[in-house]
Amino acid sequence: MGAVTLVSRATLLQALPPGNLGHFPGYPLGAGQHLWRAGRIDKRPWWYCNKGDCRFDLAPPLGTCHMGTDDLAGIIEILGPHVKPGDLLASEFLDKRTIWEWPLSGTLIAADFVSTVASGFGVTNELCAMTPYEIPQAWATALQQAGFQAVRYRTRFDTGEKARGIAHFDHAGDAGVRAGEQSHAIDASVRSRLESEFGLKVAPRPLLGELDLAPPP
């Protein structure tokens, strides 16, 4: 066993996956488990991306659809890079989006980044927050090749105890209609939860006449 090398705590420590992931911890997502995804009302939700724009994208001909185990998880992941607690979130933004629900008809086995056992394989929470995405995508590729159907992870912008992200692997592109899928409007109750749980303020965009304009310089 080699000696421990001391490094700065400010150093990014997440490395590429090891060569053998055969005993990596798995988490069964059973039949009846509901997965959620938020998106625009004019687009289909179950899109499996392989362009490298999302954290756990696979390479063609496969792709990854990023979902959550909570109905707000997808919304927060959309909003996260753009808003912070206390910001005003335009209600018109939410009017153009919907929440999709997919009840699983069978069991999926997800590689479990939330398990403490994963740390023994070199997993840190940096995988779920680091940018750019090359290292997380390398992990997704290795785990898919090891036989896993998804990754279960802590999402970047939801610090709650229960909600988890699910990056599901499949063929790239639109998966079409899912059995049992439902869409839900982002209604008043959901908007109230965004305010109470995440500190956002949801309101219509102010009209020009309602703004206090500074005089020209």
Image (cartoon, rainbow, N blue to C red):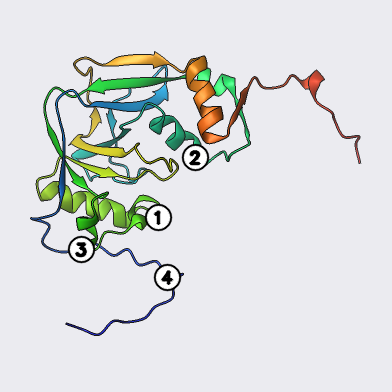
How would you rate the neighbour count of disc 3 (Cα within 10 Å): few for under 14, some for 14-19, many for 20 or more? few
Tell me the residue that label 2 is attached to.
Answer: 80
Judge left or right: residue 203 versus residue 110: right
Does residue 155 appear in this view?
yes
Which SS class for mark 4? loop
Q: Is residue 50 above or below residue 132?
A: above
Q: Amino acid at mark 1?
A: Met
Q: Residue at x 44, y 30 (%)?
A: 75
* CA distance separating discs 3 and 1: 19 Å
Q: Earlier in the sequence, mark 2 or mark 3?
A: 2
> Which dot, 2 or 3, sits closer to the camera?
3
Q: Earlier in the sequence, mark 4 or mark 1?
A: 4
* CA distance separating discs 2 and 4: 24 Å
Q: Earlier in the sequence, mark 3 or mark 1?
A: 3
Residue 130's label in the rendered image is 1
Q: Amino acid at mark 2?
A: Gly
Q: Residue at x 41, y 17 (%)?
A: 42
Q: Residue at x 52, y 15 (%)?
A: 188
Query: Residue 171, image x and y in percent?
Result: 18, 34
| Marks 4,1: beta carbons within 8 A | no
